[in-house]
Amino acid sequence: ALRFIDSESGSQTAALDLGPRAFGVDGPSNARLREADGALYLLGAADLATVKLQSTAERVAALVDAGEWLEALALQLDDGADRRGDDAATGLLRRYVALAVENAPARRAETIGTARPLDLARSHFKMLGGVCVEFCAATGRLDVLFDDVYAAFAKAKRDDVFLDVLEPYVLAGTLTRLAPEVLAAFVSHFEARGALVAVERCLLRLDPTALDFNMLIQVLRAHRLYSATFRIYNAGLGDFASPLELALDACHDDADSPGADNRAKRAILYLRYCVAGLSFPAGDSLDRDEAESAKAHALHLFLQERAPPPRPDGPLNSRDARFPHVRVLAAADREATLDVLSAHLCALAPGGTAETPNPYDGQRCARVTSPSNLAPPGPAACLEGARIASSRDDAGDDDDAAAAAAAARTAFLDFAAGHAARGVVAPSPDLADEILTYLALESRADPSDDAGGPDPDASDLDRWATLPRVLRVLETDAEALRARALRAKRPRHALALACFSARGALDAAAPRKAPSSFIVA
């Protein structure tokens, strides 16, 4: 066989059979070989073979003449020059789109057998749209896709099919940007179908720097797509506070609307990502400076003691109390809200962390001018935020309200005790006494501490383990506390307090070791 090899790729493009079938029983040995007019002619006993080299343009033209449009487009893509966006490639696509639209099936559904009706016209345009997206993405000519191709679909009143086709390519990362008019139509199309969640999924995949930011922000605000809002502001502007402010505004102003808890929980999740130094929602690590900025600005906004409404004359709603953002998020999920503050405190070194003035207090984000190296909130602000998150505004006399208030108090004391034991927070004397009383007199170490009650769970055992660590940090009269534990029938706690007192007495009585000295000969 005569094989033709592409010199650039090294792959075989064609083969010519020179065996007995083509040239008789004697094979090609008796065949005559001649060259003329740029062609090679091979005359055998039974056939005449012509070999002629063709350019890409000639081969594409031959395929088009034969009606093999998809093969012609594929060949155009295989040519290295045309992959760079040559006019020949886009011209071929325009001709194909015009022909395909002109010869589209009629707008009617056909039934095949017992299956449901098949919309041949929609299937035709869906196939056409997929070909156009892949071709334009491969050639880098998205301008042709969003201009000529989209216009052709719109003229045929099949722009809905075009917009549907875009979704999987955006989610797969093939398309990273959409033209402004196409993006607006895309949002309107999916909104009419009640599928705004699909819009948000796509916005999380698009490149924010390649989009019309002002138009996009209007869309995000109008449709409350907060996950996409977080990403667009973060990746497009490096702004971590403004999108959180938008989400918190919705939590305050629409607290009674459907989905209010979901919005609050999404804001909590975003805060957790910022504290961890991760991009939202991908979870990739931010660089060090950006991670510190994200944590500082998001936490300071979250811990605003006073928060003004979006408009000077606007209603305060739930902003009229201290630390309103903490309150509104804790109402949706207190445990997750405390976890945000706890994650920040766990990253601080024991002792010596200075308090940082909150530049966002009483200000909207647009009016805040803060240093680029803003430090995150200190332990005192986080401890106060945790206290507010654990407070109950709906206390009542019924059993459910009393149980909820007790659970909130327990959550705060566990939070304060844990970080006090690490030496990160310094509770006030009253809070320190409440913590020690709670650990020594209210938690249980084993069933004997509460006759007839349930066995201690993991939380009880954690508190039991925290007691000696807190005793080493907080100043207290351990003997007086031991006596109270005995009266409250907490023998194990009393024993732990006695051991602590004895250890302290031994340490005080033990002579101090003299510092080591070295004698140099």
Image (cartoon, rainbow, N blue to C red):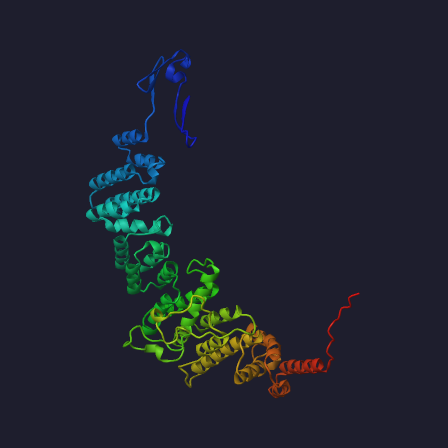
Does residue 311 show up? yes
Residue at the spot x=35%, y=80% of the render? 320
> Which residue does the image show at 22% across and 38% down from the upper left?
99
Residue 448 vertical position relative to residue 22 in the rendered view, above or below: below
Q: Which of these two is toward me, 125 or 187?
A: 187
Query: In screen coordinates, is 112 left or right of 247?
Result: left
- In this rendering, would 210 be left or right of 160? right
Q: Residue furthest front?
A: 521
Q: Give the image quarter of residue 187.
A: bottom left
Q: Left or right: 505 with respect to 288?
A: right
- In the displayed structure, 243 sits above or below 166; it is below
Pinpoint residue 330: horizontal percent, then vertical percent.
42, 74
Image quadrant occupied by the N terminus: top left
Quadrant for the C terminus in the image: bottom right
Q: Residue furthest right?
A: 521
Q: Position of residue 202 (x, y in %)?
A: 34, 55
27 and 174: which one is in front?
174
285 or 25: which is nearer to us? 285
**Residue 518, x across and y down, in percent:** 76, 68
**Can you give x and y, in whole percent of width and height, for residue 250 in the image?**
33, 70
Q: Is residue 102 above or below residue 179?
A: above
- The image quadrant of residue 474 is bottom right
